[in-house]
Image: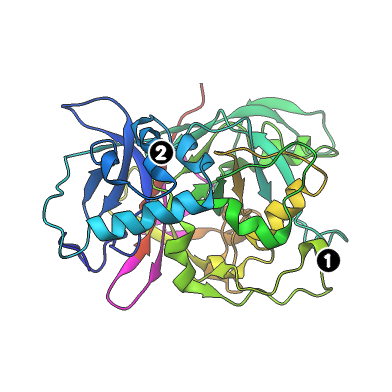
Amino acid sequence: MSFVKIDEKSDFSYHNLPYGVFSTPENPRHRIGVAIGDQILDLSVIKSLFRGPVLSNHQDVFDQPTLNAFMGLGYEAWREARRSLQQLLSANETTLRDDVMSLNCPLSLSPSHTQTWKENALMPNWLRLPVGYHGRASSIVVSGTPIRRPSGQMRPDQSKPPVFGQSKQLDIELEMAFFVGGGNRLGEPIPIERAHQHIFGMVLMNDWSARDIQAWEYVPLGPFLGKNFGTTISPWVVPMEALLPFAEPNTVQDPKPLPYLCHDDAFTFNINLFVSVKGEAMKEAATICKSNFKYMYWTMKQQLAHHTVNGCNVRPGDLLASGTISGPDPDSFGSMLELSWKGSKTVDLGGGETRTFLKDGDEVTLTGYCEGSGYRVGFGPCAGTILPAL
């Protein structure tokens, strides 16, 4: 255990040690840190203590303003760093202390992120491959960044021409996402047997969606303006090694996937997920969704193997998202679209407040954690507030 005093309900236990980027009022330079309890360990200060066979020659990666260089060192470097951190923060270590912190976006994102989706599960390819599309990385923001209500073309009345205006069906999507660590060369697929060596860690993701804009534009090429106006992620990247104790058997896939997508080792995880909404007039947020990452049909290893099977190269910092995480029960649906049955019924927030879709001023917060014996491995909040359209 650690010398740092940590509440057992803290997301950032000694068993977690997630990576992020932070600054302080005294030192505004962005640098890499590890969250533990309510403190941050500044890795740029202790970089000389990483003396293993890989990191001893690459200590300067912890001086960088993003995690990309560290991610790019690969699987053995990540494992080595975690072992060193666990030793430095153990109960016998008494020399490390942290500063007051402010959070910043943890990564420099590469040009695209990929999402799988389940909006039309009856499509014949959905049970055969992890369906996905590419989206903008430039509009991915860290938790706490406001989201502007988007405008675009819509066709609310199918008997009339489309109109331009602000979205009236602004929605959330409860998702998780993983960051690619070591990449691959163009033309060289990542085999599923080695996919785990390329998956650095996970964050929470809210893939904000304008359903009315999306409905008019998405045929035949998929989402565009209905998705690219903003995506929120949590600021701390939880390493995969911290999640392994919570691995669960994969969903039984029928029909059996093609060989390049098959793996038997458990690579889905028991991560409790929650969505809350707080309107401007509300004193407390209302929880509208309780779900779990284990409900996902395709695994992250399958996503990465499929994404690269044609020779597509990925790079450190590429972000691949899960798609909407919805469970079997009505209160486990991961979007307002599902919770309100496409706007046909209201979602009760308490105190006389109801929603079908989001209003200006609504603050949406995603949270998630794995529950251990007397500790948690969590992700911190993934939050954003809706601003009026311009």
How many numbered badges does the structure rendering display?
2
> Does residue 255 appear to the left or right of 113 in the view shown?
right
Work out which quarter of the rendered image holds the N terminus and state it: bottom left
In this view of the protein, can residue 155 be seen by the observer? yes
Q: Position of residue 5 (x, y in %)?
A: 15, 62
> Mark 1 — residue?
259
Q: Residue at x 18, y 28 (%)?
A: 25
Q: Position of residue 172 (x, y in %)?
A: 54, 48
309 or 356: nearer the eye? 309
The disc labelled 2 sits on which kind of residue? Asn
Q: Residue at x 58, y 68 (%)?
A: 268
Q: Which residues are magenta?
A: 348-376
- Give the label on residue 57, or none: 2
Tag 1 near tag 2, CB within 8 Å: no
Q: Is residue 360 magenta?
A: yes
Cα separation between marks 1 and 2: 39 Å
212, above or below 240, in the image: above
